[in-house]
Image: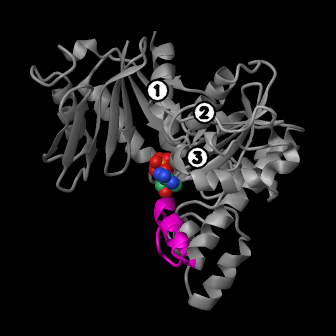
Amino acid sequence: MNILVINCGSSSLKYQLIDSETEQVSAKGLCERIALDGRLTYQPTGGEKEVGDFPMPTHEEAIQLVLDRLVNPETGVLKSLDEVDAIGHRVLHGGHKITSSVLIDDEVIATIDEAKDLGPLHNPANLIGIKACMKLMPGKPNVAVFDTTFGMAMPPKAYMYAVPHEWYEKYHVRRYGFHGTSHSFVSKELVKFLNLDPNNHKVIVCHLGNGSSVSATVNGKCVDTSMGLTPLEGLIMGTRSGDIDPAVLEYIARKEGKDVFELVNILNKKSGVFGMSNGLSSDFRDLDAAAKDGNELAANAVQAFCYRVAKYIGSYAAAMNGVDAIALTGGIGENGVGERDKILSYLGYLGVTIDAEANKTRGKNQIISTPDSKVTVAIIPTNEELAIARDTAMLAK
Ligand code: ADP
């Protein structure tokens, strides 16, 4: 089946056309600056990349431009849009009702809309993408794959906050977890790659990118994950603080006369390693380079990031009463040789020993622990688009 995977942001849209049988990408690209000046990138596999400026006042025009490229007689990869079998949409938040990927109907649309308070930046954009595809390709099955559904398997002891119960009853305040598509994909790939028993395993996945999170999975089910009601909780990230004493907000509110909206915005956009390095960068390549040149704040930010990841791994090993394997993924997990080394250096007590040569690997499945390591550690590149295509093909059949 030809699956068109769409990931709609507020002013951008990423897409991939994937053949679900061969799992190969036929074409991919993105639309940026939607509603501003509009820029389209189209890359057919094996063909020449096209980048151009086109007016795209809304996501609908952006998707139309993509569809035109896919069927272009010279550079397209399809004869007609009839060859698109289904569309898979990445959706941030499924709210408290949705626990798996679903075929989109009016009820699902209403549920995504209802969850917009929980995902104010993403859910409205995701819905615009869904509606545009329904309009431009009527009658095709559309599937929603949510960032939150993997975490919905958590037990109450992991997802409930220690706050007044009525917040949960009235407003569904609980931990949801995000990056679920990645955690689900990588944990399954890890089990396959290491030949673990699909019905008897305990694994930890560290998704380390601009946003970062850790998950604990027992026999294919997520039992805990580090992000919460929103993606702000948990690890130190590029610009997000992760775990913090909420009283800091009140303290700074009084000191600087800021309101809660402004402060949470700072925790989301100006904190993390960016904030810790005094605004130097949120990119670990810059921080590593600055640390090498003697910048102490940058060095500390990287150390703190790795320390927090190691603490979460330790707490999840305890939560599962053991761990068989650990996967590292995302831009930092797949490429950050130094970060991996720092994180794993904390795990000697678990019997983890690292193979320094193997740890030089970037961007491919690779065991980086030694053969006698008690816990196997591996790099497993994530592929969220493929995960969305797999779910879409399964539901659209
Ligand atoms: P996103 O969360 O936006 O999908 P990615 O998973 O692509 O992000 O991760 C981006 C991060 O990966 C960047 O912050 C960058 O610092 C980090 N990264 C990429 N290459 C390297 C590298 N060689 N060493 C350390 N970090 C890296």
Q: CA distance from mark 1 to mark 2?
A: 19 Å
- Magenta residues (range): 274-295
Tell me which residue sits at (24%, 25%) in the image.
46
Q: Nearer the viewer, mark 1 or mark 2?
A: 2
Residue that protrudes farthest toward the right in the picture: 321
Residue 312 versus residue 156 in the image, above or below: below
Residue 154 lies in the magenta-colored region: no
The label on residue 333 is 3
Q: Is residue 5 visible?
A: yes
Which residue was labeled with disc 2? 366
The residue nearer to you, when weighing 394 against 324, is 324
Q: Amino acid at mark 3?
A: Gly
Which residue was labeled with disc 1? 386
Where residue 70 sits: x, y (%)? 21, 25
Q: Is mark 2 within 8 Å of ligand 1?
A: no
Q: Earlier in the sequence, mark 2 or mark 3?
A: 3
Q: Is residue 230 visible?
A: no
Q: Earlier in the sequence, mark 1 or mark 3?
A: 3
Asked if the residue under mark 3 is in contact with the one under mark 2, i.e. CB atoms within 8 Å, the reply is no
Q: Amino acid at mark 1?
A: Leu
Q: CA distance from mark 1 to mark 3?
A: 19 Å
